[in-house]
Image: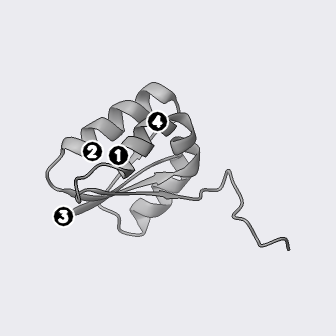
Amino acid sequence: MKVVLLGPQRMVMGFLLGGIHEGYVCEDTEESKKRLEECLVEPDIGIILISQSVADLIPDRVYAARTSPRMIPVVSVIPDEMRRPDTCGV
């Protein structure tokens, strides 16, 4: 099973250097929708990581993928450099 990432260019490059199987640069809504749909039907993909900035472009498709009754692929939204994680008020 492959792990793929949909995200901005810097994030994709970093994850590819770190050993992720595939990474797709998604900078607009149409590209994001297209890549997510392709990944959802690919039988070799087991985990789809989506950066928060890409998830913000297509929230309805991400929600549908995450709440699907299918167990595979697992879809997870991860923070990216565009957003700082909540630091619990610090």
Against 41, residue 83 (above or below) is below
Q: Earlier in the sequence, mark 4 or mark 1?
A: 4
Amino acid found under the numbered disc labelled 1: Ala
| Mark 3 lies on residue | 1
Q: Gap in Å between the C-alphas at discs 2 and 3?
A: 12 Å
Q: Give the number of the disc on residue 60.
A: 4
Q: Quadrant of the N terminus?
A: bottom left
| Residue at 30%, 48% in the rendered image | 68
Left or right relative to 42: residue 4: right
Element on which disc 3 rests: loop
| Location of mark 2 (residue) | 39
Residue neighbourhood size for the residue with mark 4, other residues' Cα within 10 Å, grouped as few (<14), some (14–19), many (≥20): few
For mark 4, give the secondary structure: helix
Left or right of 89? Residue 1 is: left
Q: Nearer the viewer, residue 19 or 41?
A: 41
What's the distance in space between the residues labelled 3 and 1, CA to CA?
A: 18 Å
Q: Position of residue 35 (x, y in %)?
A: 34, 37
Q: Residue furthest top?
A: 30
Asked whether the beta carbons under mark 2 and mark 1 sit within 8 Å of each other, the answer is no
Q: Nearer the viewer, mark 3 or mark 4?
A: 4
Q: Amino acid at mark 2?
A: Cys
Which numbered disc covers residue 65? 1
Disc 2 crowd, CA 10 A, few/some/many (<14, 14-19, 20+) = some
Colouring used for the render: one colour
Q: Are marks 2 and 3 in contact (CB under 8 Å)?
A: no
Q: Residue 86, image x and y in percent?
A: 73, 65
Q: What distance separates the C-alpha of mark 2 from that of mark 1?
A: 11 Å
Seen at 35% across and 64% down, the residue is 20
In the image, what residue occupies the spot 53% across and 46% down?
8
Which residue is nearer to you in this view: 79 or 7? 79
